[in-house]
Image (cartoon, rainbow, N blue to C red):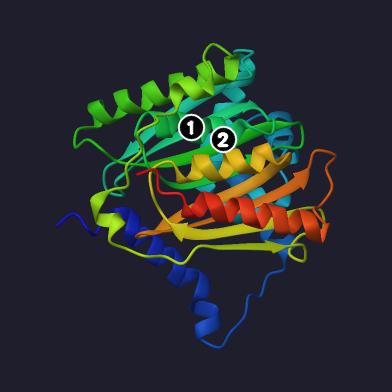
Amino acid sequence: PGVWTGWKGQLLRTLYFETEPLLGGGHLTLSRSERVARAQDALRERLAGWPKQDLERFIDRHYPSYWLRTDLDVIAEHAKLIRDAEAQRKSLVTHIATDAFRGVTEITLLAPNYPRLLAMVAGACTGAGANIVDAQISTTRDGMALDTIHLEREFDHADDEERRAKRIAVSIERLLKGEVRLAEVVSTKRKPKAKLSAFKVEPQVVIDNTLSDALTVIEINGLDRPGLLYDVTREISDMNLDIASAHIATFGEKAVDVFYVTDLTGKKITSSSREAAIRERLMRALQARHD
């Protein structure tokens, strides 16, 4: 009981639809640019009632990767969030939504981007005892971060879940405004869930410079536990790396996190010695247990 959730079902459906063409001996017929254009046209159709200038400004501010990996429903919600923030002249806003079927609660953050942003978001979740099961981290062309995190649901009733999410959102906002220190927010007592302690997942760190022309890709695999994302992103920030985008996922007890990074000058990580140092520190973060 409680092992299968709508969230896990969605992961399997996503995996099926992504691999079906290959398993069937086929191939993707649309190029990358065609897929981006199709996604943008779908948004134009969805938001047909918007002023053209507002809609095109939203489209122009996002990189191709955003259009390739973000669902239309989510993009439309992002467009409304950004439009409302601009109308209210706010540069920092959060939005909360609950999904009982998938067993997750969603927090979307719009804020000025800077290197330690994701570590602060993960730290606020860790301090609240919330487990991040998925996250999509994006940066716009005009320097804003648009981050959506999905938290494992804790309460059965939506009202209780929304109150918990609001506390986390307030904590994130206070961190970003400098009203509280990250060390004060992060809990020092982070014990692995009992059901996860019995599992073993071989930790792995892969660094690749061939997947992107401008960014270094870091993929980490390891045993999921409370505070893992915070530990990993803190190490990345401490090594003076800037996270341009990221995708966080959990598959049962296994965490698979992918980060697209540069150094603080905006360049890829090409030094073999620095790659080795990054790999070593992230491996230590994966192996830490906080018992």
Q: Is residue 224 visible?
A: yes
Pick the front one: 86 or 8: 8
Q: Secondary structure at mark 2?
A: helix
Residue 142, picture quadrant: top right
Residue 13 falls in image quadrant? bottom left
Residue at mark 2:
119
* 10 Å crowding of disc 2: few (<14), some (14-19), many (20+): many
Residue at x 73%, y 39% (from the top left corner):
240
**Considering only vertical position in the picture, is 178 above or below 233?**
above
User: Where's residue 291, x and y in %?
Assistant: 34, 44
Circles 2 and 1: CB distance less than 8 Å?
A: yes
Is 57 left, or right, of 120 in this rendering?
Answer: right
Pointer 1 local density, CA inside 10 Å: few below 14, some 14–19, many at least 20: many
Res 91 quadrant in image: top right
Give me the disc on residue 123. Answer: 1
Residue 146 location, x and y as percent?
Answer: 60, 35
Between 41 and 1, the residue placed more toward the observer is: 1
- Identified by mark 2, the residue type is Ala
Establish if 248 lies above or below 77: below
Position of 160 with respect to 186 (left or right) is left
Image quadrant holding the N terminus, namely bottom left
Q: How many numbered dots are placed on residues in this image? A: 2
Mark 1, secondary structure of its residue? helix
Q: Is residue 39 visible?
A: no
Residue 226 lies, in percent from the top left, at 38, 43
